[in-house]
């Protein structure tokens, strides 16, 4: 990667500013001053320092975040009226084009994965990859055997669309609390599935994407980077 691009990305500064620092002789690569902004460096191995201070941490080609989406925030990159999931993290990643890999309704809460890795995001949402998503749902009426059997067989929605089989099972002692596992992502899917049985959804929370559960330490609106192990587990679960 070009040195000026690398420095701009690592420091979150414009490319013009990065070139100025390089031209001023403030930047060393593997211990030697480098004044050429177009010098090519190995971004995974080079030891780059600015003003004598080594850049901390390894270079990340892509960013992968686990966000606990609160109610009222929309799952989009930009929105004219509402705060988006990307807005919540943008200040920490000024040079990254982060977007959500899959959506939750504005009223839903829980795990939203944000990344700038388009191929990875596609694997997370693609029905062909069968990555299960786990939801905790509170209904306005108790879960019935008909719902459980219907979900397992594949619900036919009001518009005639038949969905893939899904799991619905009691979640604890409250008969209105349900754990749902889906392997596809149709708009308002869970609300429409329960709607077929005349049941309304009061609360909807995504607890896990594939093998990775939402970190319980994250309060609504909080986020952290996924660990390398979590990214690897998601890739493996998507068959990569
Ligand atoms: N199904 C829904 O109806 N809403 C969500 O936010 C997610 C799944």
Image (cartoon, rainbow, N blue to C red):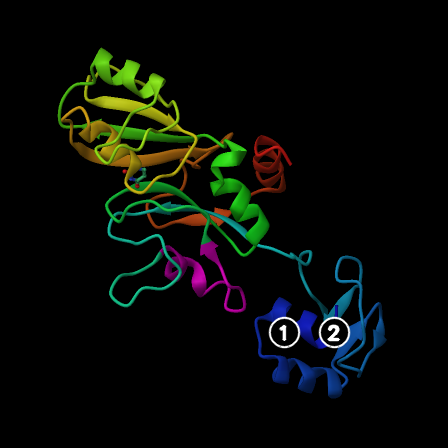
Residue 113: say if magenta: no
Residue topped by disc 1: 8
Q: Quadrant of residue 150?
A: top left
The location of residue 72, given as percent across then percent down, is 24, 52
Above or below residue 94? Residue 229 is above
- Of the 4 image quadrants, the one containing the C terminus is top right
Q: In this view, does 20 lie to the left or right of 141?
A: right
Name the quadrant containing residue 133: top left
The quadrant the N terminus occupies is: bottom right
Which residues, given as a range, are shown in magenta? 85-99
Q: What element carries label 2?
A: helix
Crowd band around label 1 with a 10 angstrom C-alpha radius: few (<14), some (14–19), many (20+): some
Residue 110: % across, % down: 35, 40
Who is closer to the viewer here, 19 or 98? 98
Q: Is residue 221 above or below residue 9?
A: above
Apparent side of residue 147 relative to residue 22 in the rendered image (left or right): left
- Looking at the picture, does residue 182 appear above or below residue 33? above
Residue depicted at x 80% and y 58%: 45
For marks 1 and 2 on the same chain, the one whose residue lies earlier in the sequence: 2
Residues 149 and 142: in front is 149
Pick the residue in front: 111 or 240: 240
Q: Can residue 54 be seen in this view?
A: yes
Q: Please check the rendered image and state whether residue 89 is part of the magenta-colored stretch, yes or no.
A: yes
Residue topped by disc 2: 3
């Amino acid at each position: 990667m070009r040195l000026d691009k690398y420095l701009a990305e690592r420091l979150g500064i414009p490319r013009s500013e990065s070139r100025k620092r390089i031209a001023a002789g403030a930047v060393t690569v593997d211990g030697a001053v480098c004044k050429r902004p177009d010098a090519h460096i190995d971004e995974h191995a080079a030891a780059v320092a600015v003003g004598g201070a080594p850049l901390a941490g390894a270079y990340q080609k892509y960013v992968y975040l686990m966000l606990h989406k609160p109610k009222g925030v929309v799952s989009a990159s930009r929105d004219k009226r509402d705060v988006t999931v990307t807005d919540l993290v943008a200040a920490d990643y000024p040079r990254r084009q982060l977007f959500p890999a899959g959506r939750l309704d504005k009223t839903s809460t829980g795990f939203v994965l944000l990344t700038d890795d388009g191929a990875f995001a596609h694997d997370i949402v693609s029905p062909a990859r069968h990555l299960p998503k786990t939801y905790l749902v509170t209904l306005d009426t108790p879960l019935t055997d008909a719902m459980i059997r219907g979900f397992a067989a594949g619900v036919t929605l009001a518009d005639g669309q038949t969905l893939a089989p899904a799991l619905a099972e009691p979640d604890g002692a409250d008969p209105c609390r349900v754990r749902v596992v889906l392997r596809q992502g149709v708009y308002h899917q869970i609300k429409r599935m329960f709607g077929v049985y005349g049941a309304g959804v009061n609360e909807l929370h995504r607890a896990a994407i594939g093998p990775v559960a939402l970190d319980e330490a994250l309060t609504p609106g909080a986020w952290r980077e996924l660990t390398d192990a979590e990214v690897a587990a998601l890739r493996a679960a998507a068959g990569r």
